[in-house]
Amino acid sequence: MSKNIIVLSGGTGTPKLLLGLKELIPQDRLTVIVNTAEDIIVSGNKICPDLDTVLYLFSYLIDKGKWWGVKDDTFNTHNALLAMGIDEGMMIGDTDRATHITRTGFIDAGMNLTQTTARLCNHLGIDSGVSILPMCNEDVATYIITPEGILHFQDFWVGRKGKDTVLDVQISNVEHARITDEIYAAFNACETVIIGPSNPVTSIGPIISIPGMVDLLKNKKVIAVSPIIGKEPVSGPAGKLMAAKGIEVSSKGVAACYQDFIDVLVIDSDDIEADYSNIGNGIKVVRTDTMMTDKDKSIQLATFILGL
């Protein structure tokens, strides 16, 4: 039986886990399916924040201080635009911008996002055999509903620092997204799927909302890592977004998001807010240290998960 592994990834939490996984298993056995519902056009270029974080991780370019962007990047173009009165709404480094320009050029030339990502892997020198796949080729967008109006996720989280009251979260056009041939092939070759500790609403939620994705997951062993400890997310707006969707802000709430297909939920050893011994749906709950504060801790958590 194949022992290939698929990892469903969002922004910062799951790439930290990938940092450990890629040290432990041959990378040609690893497929990373990445959220693209936070993609946005800035200054005419297509930015794929979650995809880029994974690309930069595997090309050894990632800024591990921020877990986005390129280490030691410069911001000359960004600052020049600001001087001319143009605020892009996010800081885009010069080397990072080159990725966006290249991606946009490929798409304008007729490539889909999967083909474009494969070309970017080559350009960035990712030759380890890892397969990095966008969740779909269609444009899908996450919108945050607030009392002041509807905001794109990037405007909510980057532009406004996540301070708005959240009434709801909507994933636009996901019903028209299609599972790609490359993702079908990855599922056919794998036996285990790992869902990293990313936001279950806006990072993993769009991936599993693609029509047919849950059915694929039901046929695999699925291990999910909770991004919640007690009643608080480790980082990011997961708590606020879960509450807006009526989901309990806890690891139990995370389990509820994935209850149709997960087999094992990994929670932090310090998560003592509730009794997880009878979580339901046949889900096994296991505890370990999930705080990946450095590479060794990432390897430690990855080792624990592979042991499952």
Image: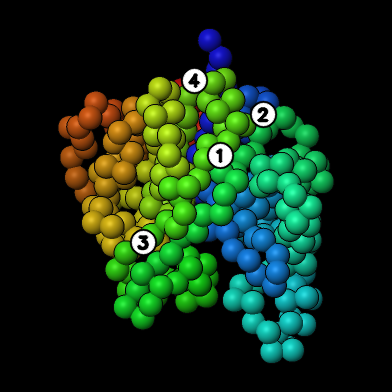
Q: Residue at x 63, y 24 (%)?
A: 29
Is 227 left or right of 28, judged from the image as shown? left
Residue 214 in which image quadrant: top left
Residue type highlighted by circle 1: Ile
Density class for disc 2 (Cα within 10 Å; few <14, some 14-19, many ≥20) is: some
Disc 2 versus disc 3: nearer the observer: 3
- The residue under label 1 is 33
Can you tell which mark lies on residue 169? 3
- The residue under label 2 is 27
Can the viewer see residue 222? no
Give me the C-alpha separation between circle 4 and circle 1. 15 Å
Q: Residue at x 77, y 67 (%)?
A: 94
The one of 161 and 231 positioned closer to us in this rendering: 161
Can you tell which mark lies on residue 183? none
Q: Is residue 6 above or below residue 85?
A: above
Q: Earlier in the sequence, mark 4 or mark 2?
A: 2
Q: Secondary structure at mark 3?
A: strand
Disc 2 versus disc 1: nearer the observer: 1
Residue 257 in which image quadrant: top left
Residue type highlighted by circle 2: Gln
Can the viewer see residue 219? yes
Q: Secondary structure at mark 1?
A: strand
Q: Earlier in the sequence, mark 1 or mark 3?
A: 1
Q: Earlier in the sequence, mark 3 or mark 4?
A: 3
Is 75 left or right of 292, judged from the image as shown? right
Can you tell which mark lies on residue 191? 4
Q: Is residue 14 above or below residue 28?
A: below
Density class for disc 4 (Cα within 10 Å; few <14, some 14-19, many ≥20) is: some
Give me the C-alpha separation between circle 4 and circle 2. 15 Å
- The percent coordinates of residue 17 (x first, y second) are 53, 41
- The percent coordinates of residue 275 (x first, y second) are 18, 40
Which image quarter holds the C terminus? top left
